[in-house]
Image (cartoon, rainbow, N blue to C red):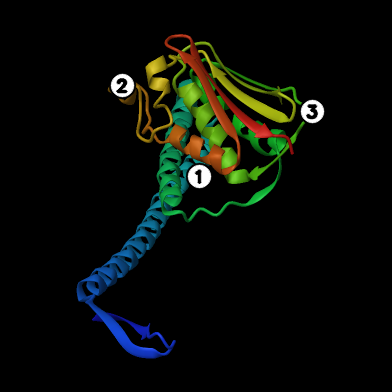
Amino acid sequence: WESAVVSPIINNQGTISHFIAIKEDITEKKKILEELVRAKEEAEKSDKLKSEFLAQMSHEIRTPIHIVTSSLAFIKEGIKNKIDEDDIELFENIEISAKRIIRTIDLVLNVSELQLGIYKLSFSVIDLDKSILSRIVSEYIQLAKQKNLELIYNYSSEQKNINADEYCVIQIFANLIDNAIKYTKTGKVEIIVSDYREDELAVEVRDTGIGMSKEFLEHIFEPFNQEYHGYSREYEGNGLGLALVKKYCELNNAKIEVESGKGIGSTFRVIFKNN
């Protein structure tokens, strides 16, 4: 391959007297360009295969888990008058564990979708109380009860609606509430909604849990990050949840703030613009 540039040379009479040609061998450049194009196509193909594989794996895992939980619910309903509280608690533990497996699968899939840039946002006007927070809180009542924790929900703002992607907002608060309960041994978890500054709405998730050091707060939203390895043994988790929370907040033009101290608990504050 060659690149050629031909330019005229003008004489004193203003006419073309000669042409000058400059040629360059661009064979190597052409090869490199073709290799880059091929590598890009292979990467895109690989990303697509990865996405399809994860989606298929999610389906393969979710389906039997749903069958197990549905069967257990059916059995539990049939024998609930014949078993004691301890046996009922066993059924509830199985249900909670199954939900945690599905939740972990969702986290991995969500990270993959965001990394591949294939998540499609769908903004709409959402009732933050009825459509999101009330539903999530009701789902976590049993888990909090099992740990003898108070789960308090207080919506004091007159502003009910936000403009956001519903799935993102659900994931934000499911992750924050799940973490608050997970890292709290005694005391309470509170979800407080209030007006914030002039045109903002704030949702605070507060806990009386183990808290975090100031040094760790600088890295809290990094993927796969936990304060120290002891947490991963004593507390279930993979370090993905808060990284996703941060990303989902950014995608929805929301801000997230955190206050925490070792042994005194944590407060996560998500701030939305009023609709």
Q: Which residue is mark 2?
A: 228
| Residue 84 shows in the view | no
Instruction: Give the farthest residue toward the right.
Output: 158
Q: Secondary structure at mark 2?
A: loop
Q: Which residue is mark 1?
A: 70
Q: Secondary structure at mark 3?
A: loop
Q: Which residue is mark 3?
A: 158
Q: Is residue 275 left or right of residue 86?
A: right
Task: Tell me the kind of residue under disc 3.
Answer: Glu
Q: Where residue 4 sits in the image (x, y, percent)?
A: 29, 81
**CB under 8 Å between discs 2 and 1:** no
| Residue 265 shows in the view | yes
Question: Viewer-proximal residue, 264 or 100?
Answer: 264
Question: Viewer-proximal residue, 182 or 229?
Answer: 229
Instruction: Give the farthest residue toward the top.
Output: 263
Above or below, 27 against 59 in this view is below
Residue in the image at 52% along x and 29% along y: 176
In space, the residues marked 3 and 1 are separated at their CA atoms by 39 Å
Task: Tell me the kind of residue under disc 1.
Answer: Ser
Dot 3 or dot 1, earlier in sequence: 1
Identify the image quadrant of the N terminus: bottom left
Disc number lying in front (2 or 1): 2
Dot 2 or dot 3, earlier in sequence: 3
Q: Is residue 194 left or right of residue 20?
A: right
Residue in the image at 24% along x and 70% along y: 29
Task: Tell me the kind of residue under disc 2.
Answer: Tyr
In space, the residues marked 2 and 1 are separated at their CA atoms by 37 Å
Q: Where residue 267 sits in the image (x, y, percent)?
A: 54, 19
Q: Secondary structure at mark 1?
A: helix
Residue in the image at 28% along x and 72% along y: 34
